[in-house]
Image (cartoon, rainbow, N blue to C red):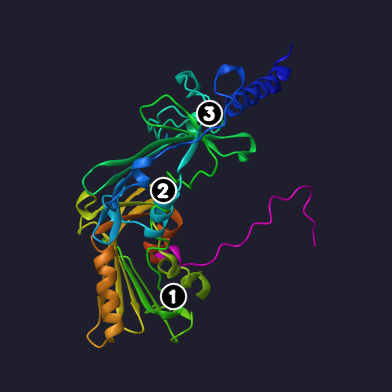
Amino acid sequence: MTTRSLIPLGALTAVLLVLAVMFGGSGVASTERQTVQLLPELADRDQPITSVRVVTARHDLRLSKQGELWRVDEPFDGFEARIDFIDTLIDGLAELNEGEPKASDPRWHERLGLREPEPDPDNPPEASDPASVATRVVLRDASDRVLADVIVGVPTIGGRFGRFARRAGEDQTYLIPSPPRIAGDPQLYLPRPLFRIFPGRMRELEISHPDGDTLNIINTEQGTTAFRIRNVAAGTPIRATPTELGQLFTVLNNFNAFDIRAASERPIDPGEAIYSTYRTWDGLTVTATSSPKTENGSGWVGLAFEASDDASDEVVAEAADLNERLGAWRYRVRATEFGRIVRRFDEISGERPTPSLGPTTGPVPGP
């Protein structure tokens, strides 16, 4: 038998094994259709849930409720989380009332994706490995009582019949018909975007590097994106178009980060920092303080917001709200956006390079 023929045979064997668990064949599960309440403590809770933990092969996500807010304790040092996303998770688990008992032999846990996940982001399992989908969810109330501790595994064939699950610490597996949406990626729990300021609202941007390099861009007409470089010596060639200059402001139109840490955990040396100051027509100032140290082009940024003396009450309130939510953190921004935040004058000045037509072949025609 060839290797090529072994591959579909192995896949067929896996399918048959899962079918055996689903429908009670091969003596691994009872042929009687019965259901049990999988998470009775969650259904009968009398206190609100205040702690959520989601563990996968890639992440160990921990959230806690503080007052009216949910926060991502791990890995984002307590940054604000999306309430709607957590409510969806909790409500989905609360509706997980019934499960159909299947295999009780722990040797099935591996195949059904029910082995307890152990986070190892540097060496995650292959997508085809059942361990890649195993997800453990732990919910606790204000008294630290465990209301749910369940491991959700692989879907049935085509996902038509639900997914397999088991209570953590127990061998018995269950088939749950309508599994909740459980996301283990911490980034999905962050607000998107973190904040937004429309480019047409921008009046000026000044980027100052510690070596004295300064780039100053202004908007010449309120409500538009007619950007140009300010205080440029006559005759200085500028290769950036107004559209390209405007792209430096779009970072604030959709500001996101893929990692967040408390400011105390990611200090930025003021003497080495790059300062990017954005000013709007209506009196809001946003100062991005960036570390010159990059990681694969991405970099860490701190944010501060201030309203001018003549700003409206609305802008004053906006600055206060943004400072309260975002001012005590550091944000790791992807390479493209970080490059725009710390752009240098010499990166947009100078003549545009002449496009190359490629090497010529054969004799060059004479006159």
The answer to whether residue 297 shows anywhere in this view is: no
> Which residue is rendered at x = 41% and y = 80% of the image?
201
Q: Are marks 1 and 3 in contact (CB under 8 Å)?
A: no
Placement of the C terminus among the 4 image quadrants: bottom right
Q: Picture coordinates of residue 350 (x, y %)?
A: 48, 67
Residue type of the residue flagged with mark 3: Asp
Within the image, what quadrant is residue 42 found in?
Answer: top left
- Marks 1 and 3, how far apart at CA: 44 Å
Q: Which residues are magenta?
A: 346-367
Residue corresponding to mark 1 = 198
Residue corresponding to mark 2 = 94
Q: Which mark is residue 367?
A: none
Q: Earlier in the sequence, mark 1 or mark 2?
A: 2
Pointer 1 local density, CA inside 10 Å: few below 14, some 14–19, many at least 20: some
Q: Secondary structure at mark 2?
A: helix
Residue type of the residue flagged with mark 2: Ala
Residue in front for this viewpoint, 201 or 68 = 68
**Magenta segment: does it hold 357?**
yes
- Marks 1 and 2, how far apart at CA: 40 Å
Q: Picture coordinates of residue 1 (x, y %)?
A: 74, 11
Q: Is residue 94 left or right of residue 34?
A: left
Within the image, what quadrant is residue 316 found in?
Answer: bottom left
